[in-house]
Amino acid sequence: MHFHIILTELCNSKCKYCYEKSMNEFNNGLEKKFQFDFSAPSTSKIDLNKLKKFILKDKNPMIIFYGGEPLLEIEKIKKIINLFKNTNVKFRMQTNAKLLNELPINYLKKIGKILVSIDGNEKLTNHNRGKGTYELVLKNLKKAKQQGYRGEIVARMTISQEFPKISPQTKHLLKTRLFDSIHWQLDLGFYKNDFEIKKIKKFVKTYNKQISKLTKFWKNNLKKGKVLKLYPFLGIFENILEDKPTKLMCGAGHSGYTITTNGKITACPIMNNIKNFYCGTLNSNPNKLKKIHIISPCTSCNYFKFCGGRCLYSNYAKLWPKQGQELICNTIKHTIEEIKKITPEIKKLIKNKIISKNDFNYEKYFGPEIIP
């Protein structure tokens, strides 16, 4: 099981699609749908002995340090890593990497995979995340590698409505040679007040064209014997190949949970203060946590077995009107169809041993949502 631990809800960035939007999100109507609980502290106050007992009840536990920005709580990261010394617990982290240089390398090496927030080139990343962010992140990643970090570094891009051109930004990040894999999430459907039908239609049209270009780029590399680890493509290809019902690809509510700052267990970090999605506490058995499943309209969609529902929060919150949700789904369907188109060629490449089926393997549920 994968467990995101929210170490703090504080962050040292003010990203345009996160901080700026959250400051403008009022009267979204969610109080009529959900029961909220804002009693949790801004930084984690969980009992570490309880945490240890809870985690070790799981057969294959994975801890993901999460925030806010988890590196604002470096001492807590060190304590938790020390807490599970000589156990089978593995560690992951999702971070903006601005403070990565402050975590001692002997601790960093124990975190096998790091999901780093970065949106593409210097101009775009700094526009979205603040001046100097791109340079600082790359500097810290280079230093970590020079000090001997050999874990997987995943670029976690946010594709904003303002900048849909994902193909050149993905290629740029690959050229830095600092990222082993790439994932992206669309900034669509998470806020009510950012829905503008003309703007979204234009975004979807451009984004879909970009996905077509990126799929062709991916295929050309496959023909050369190189499987680029673009997480959405890997996950969707696997689902097409297996052709069987797929669970929610991020694992939220069934294979991955979040430990909030007061020890409540919830389905997903974005749901950390919504009672409706509480699944247990640190006193619970991790193997008997409440399951939360995707609901309609996703469950009646012909693409559901390939997609799994995209996002649990979006699926329940339904912040955008039906027309907006359909536009989001259009991007997913387009991506699935593009991967379907090249699947026969991929099968031939595997059969001819140009690439191996094992080359497409990836770790599920540690952070990349797979379906953007």
Image (cartoon, rainbow, N blue to C red):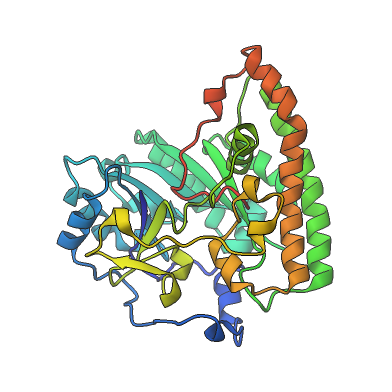
Q: Is residue 58 above or below residue 349?
A: below
Asked which quadrant contains residue 85, the reply is top left
Q: Residue 340 location in percent, x, y?
A: 73, 36
Q: Residue 78 location in percent, x, y?
A: 23, 53
Residue at 45%, 62% (x, y): give it.
268
Q: Is residue 51 above or below residue 153?
A: below
Residue at 69%, 74% (x, y): give it.
194
- Left or right relative to 166: residue 251: left
Q: Nearer the viewer, residue 11 or 318?
A: 318
Q: Residue furthest front?
A: 300
Is residue 18 among what the camera can see?
yes
Q: Residue 312 location in percent, x, y?
A: 54, 62
Q: Is residue 83 above or below residue 46?
A: above
- Left or right relative to 304: residue 292: left
Q: Nearer the viewer, residue 194 or 244?
A: 244
Asked which quadrant contains residue 261, the reply is bottom left
Residue at 33%, 77% (x, y): give it.
40
Q: Is residue 160 above or below residue 86?
A: below
- Left or right relative to 226: residue 252: left
Q: Nearer the viewer, residue 219 or 303?
A: 303
- Left or right relative to 271: residue 174: right
Residue at 35%, 75% (x, y): give it.
42
